[in-house]
Image (tube, rainbow, N blue to C red):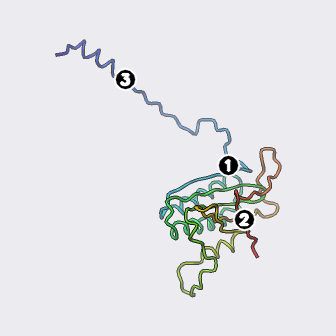
């Protein structure tokens, strides 16, 4: 049987942890708002709540970058494209990129179902159909969009929004406007 002194010695061998609580907003941030001329990425599981999460994230990036004039169109288009990836594919994850460049914001939505191509015309829907108009909305609300294959395993649906003349523009670290970029190996289709 251990003595009181032995118990005290054994207690001293047990590590003691101290908890420090810190508010992370008090930490210095290298860049307080989303940077212009950069690309932001997120990957989310393919779930029913993913379109809401993505559209809120896209709006947060645009709001932080100072482009409030593009928020509502980006919210609608992101929601439609991500909803399509969730509803019409069996992909386990949906990847989203937001590229801020020049006067243009381009959002890329990738899934692992290149065999399932979106139908922009709605496939001959009747007047009372409750679905099938998402890409028609994307075409109407965006300045450009396309669906492209990226290799054999990935499909990307992207849309671009151009800031109205005289509105905010994305600039690089030097303050000089950054030219629009295309995703790696992605083809573009002009809106007619």
* For discs 1 and 2, the disc positioned in front in the rendered view: 2
- How many circles with numbers are drawn on the protein? 3
Depth order, front residue of 96/110: 110
Q: Secondary structure at mark 3?
A: loop
Residue extending farthest to the left is 1
What crowding class fits label 3: few (fewer than 14 Cα within 10 Å), some (14-19), or many (20 or more)? Answer: few
Precedes in sequence: disc 3 or disc 1: 3
What crowding class fits label 1: few (fewer than 14 Cα within 10 Å), some (14-19), or many (20 or more)? Answer: some
Q: Real-space Cα distance between discs 3 and 2?
A: 59 Å
What crowding class fits label 2: few (fewer than 14 Cα within 10 Å), some (14-19), or many (20 or more)? Answer: few
Q: Which residue is mark 2?
A: 187
Q: Which residue is mark 1?
A: 34
Query: Which quadrant of the figure has residue 107?
Result: bottom right
Query: Which quadrant of the figure has residue 192?
Result: bottom right
Residue in the picture at 37% in, 23% down: 15
Asked whether the beta carbons under mark 1 and mark 2 sit within 8 Å of each other, the answer is: no
Q: Give the image location of residue 98, x and y in percent.
A: 66, 56
Q: Secondary structure at mark 2?
A: loop
- In the drawing, what numbered circle is on residue 15? 3
């Amino acid at each position: 049987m251990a003595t009181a002194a032995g118990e005290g010695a054994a207690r001293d061998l047990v590590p003691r942890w101290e908890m420090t609580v810190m508010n992370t907003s008090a930490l210095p941030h290298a860049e307080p708002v989303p940077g212009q001329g950069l690309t932001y990425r997120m990957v989310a599981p393919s779930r029913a709540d993913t379109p809401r999460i993505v559209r809120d994230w896209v709006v947060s990036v645009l709001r932080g970058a100072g482009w409030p004039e593009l928020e509502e169109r980006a919210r609608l288009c992101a929601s439609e494209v991500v909803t399509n990836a969730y509803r019409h594919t069996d992909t386990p994850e949906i990847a989203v990129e937001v590229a801020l460049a020049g006067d243009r914001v381009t959002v890329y939505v990738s899934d692992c179902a290149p065999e399932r191509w979106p139908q922009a015309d709605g496939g001959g829907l009747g007047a009372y159909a409750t679905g099938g108009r998402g890409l028609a909305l994307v075409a109407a609300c965006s300045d450009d969009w396309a669906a492209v294959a990226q290799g054999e395993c990935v499909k990307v649906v992207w849309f671009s929004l151009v800031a109205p003349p005289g509105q905010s523009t994305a600039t690089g670290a030097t303050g000089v406007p950054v030219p629009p970029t295309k995703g790696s190996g992605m083809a573009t289709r002009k809106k007619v």
